[in-house]
Amino acid sequence: MENLVKADIFFFITGIAVIVITICAMIVMFYVTRILRDMKRISKTMSEESDKLLNDIDSLRETVKTEGTKVITIADFFLNLFIRRQKMSKDKHSSVKSHHSLTDKIK
């Protein structure tokens, strides 16, 4: 008789544990489902935006192909401007050095 009581207590505790674990698993599955749904929405948005970006890059490529000479001209302008600044900077340094060498000779 005592074994029967122990068995009843064991099955009662096991039954409650199974119910608690099942409820916890359902809650976890609910949140996992929400997370997966959000990831699907984010993935869809990223796919749409990447398609838009690809189209923009294609149109930019076509624009560069048709108006490439304008881009090259602008690039040459800025390159020449940079080179002129470097030359002017070198000329200033060389004139300062020559001025110092002249004043040293005078002394």
Image: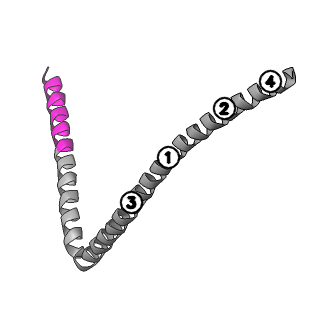
The answer to whether 81 appears left or right of 9 in the picture is left
Q: What is the CA distance from the residue labelled 2 to the residue labelled 1?
A: 20 Å
Query: Which residue lies at the image location 74% right of the left edge and 25% below the top edge?
Result: 9
Task: Give whichever of discs 2 and 1 has the lower sequence position.
Answer: 2
The answer to whether 71 appears left or right of 17 in the picture is left
Specify few, some or many for label 3: CA neighbours under 10 Å numbering under 14, 14-19, or 20 or more. few
Query: From the viewer's perspective, is the residue at label 2 or at label 4 nearer?
Result: 4
Relative to 81, is 30 above or below? above
Query: Which residue lies at the image location 50% right of the left edge and 46% below the top edge?
Result: 30
Query: Which residue lies at the image location 23% right of the left edge and 58% below the top edge?
Result: 79
Q: For the stretch drawn in magenta, what is the main secondary structure? A: helix
User: Disc 1 on helix, strand or loop?
Assistant: helix
**Residue 46 marker:** 3
CB of mark 4 within 8 Å of CB of mark 3?
no
Q: What is the CA distance from the residue labelled 3 to the residue labelled 2?
A: 43 Å
The C terminus: image quadrant: top left
Task: Give whichever of discs 1 and 4 has the lower sequence position.
Answer: 4
Q: What is the magenta range?
A: 89-107
The N terminus: image quadrant: top right
Mark 4 belongs to which amino acid?
Val
Q: What is the CA distance from the residue labelled 1 to the residue labelled 4?
A: 38 Å
Mark 1 belongs to which amino acid?
Phe
**Residue 30 marker:** 1
Task: Give whichever of discs 4 and 3 has the lower sequence position.
Answer: 4
Mark 3 belongs to which amino acid?
Met
Q: What is the CA distance from the residue labelled 3 to the residue labelled 1?
A: 24 Å
Which residue has dot 4 on it? Answer: 5
User: Disc 4 on helix, strand or loop?
Assistant: helix
Task: Give whichever of discs 3 and 2 has the lower sequence position.
Answer: 2
Mark 2 belongs to which amino acid?
Ala
